[in-house]
Image (cartoon, rainbow, N blue to C red):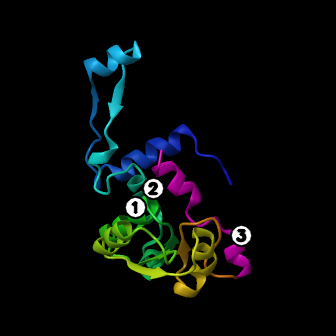
Amino acid sequence: MRLPCFTDVLRAGQTLRPHLPPTPAWSYPALDAACGAHVVVKHENVQPTGAFKVRGGLTLLATMPAAERDRGVVTYSTGNHAQSIAYAAREFRAPCTVVMPEGANESKHRAVEALGATVVLRGTTLEEARDRRHAARQPVWCSARQPCRRTRADRRRRYGLPRTAHGGT
């Protein structure tokens, strides 16, 4: 896999501009005094999902071919990544399935469903959810390290990782 370069980050920024508000960055005199330096705090909590990871999901779906995006995405996560992919899928009107372990945090589960994704509870750990995501759905794209479909061509593809990495920086 090729590592992202600065041009990739700039391209991701242009891709995201229509979908996200600028993230405010503020300084606080009391924090500066406590640290002995000028500190600027970037407030990612004001993003639609409350975290910077929304950039990764949006970049992934924005750069997918429309025909493949329309078939849907599947991922496994118990938190911000799940919300990122669910949010992006809603923005692009793509079906989304998120596989979570059976004991996942109920508020995260509800947040993902509120974004329109289907939540499938599988396994007792995140690793078990990852291993069982294949049974949840068979879309063309995944946002995890391994492809959802097991064909020779799929093993050669890197499903979204570089795009997610660029958008999540």
Q: Nearer the viewer, residue 99 or 161?
A: 99
Q: Is residue 164 left or right of residue 150?
A: left
Element type at marker 2? Answer: helix
Decide if residue 23 is on the left or right side of residue 149: left
Task: From the image, tell me which residue sits under label 2.
Answer: 56
Q: Amino acid at mark 2?
A: Gly
Residue 163 lies within the magenta run:
yes
- Residue for point 66% across, 50% down: 2
Which quarter of the picture shows residue 126?
Answer: bottom right
Q: What are the residue bounds of the magenta stretch?
A: 151-169
Left or right of 84 on screen, residue 142: right
Q: Nearer the viewer, mark 2 or mark 1?
A: 1
Mark number, residue 156 = 3
Residue count near mark 3 (Cα–Cα under 10 Å), binned few <14, some 14–19, many ≥20: few
Q: Residue at x 38, y 56 (%)?
A: 54
Report if the CB atoms under discs 2 and 1 are less than 8 Å apart.
yes
Dot 1 corresponds to which residue?
Answer: 84
The reply to whether the C-beta atoms of the residues labelled 3 and 2 are less than 8 Å apart is no
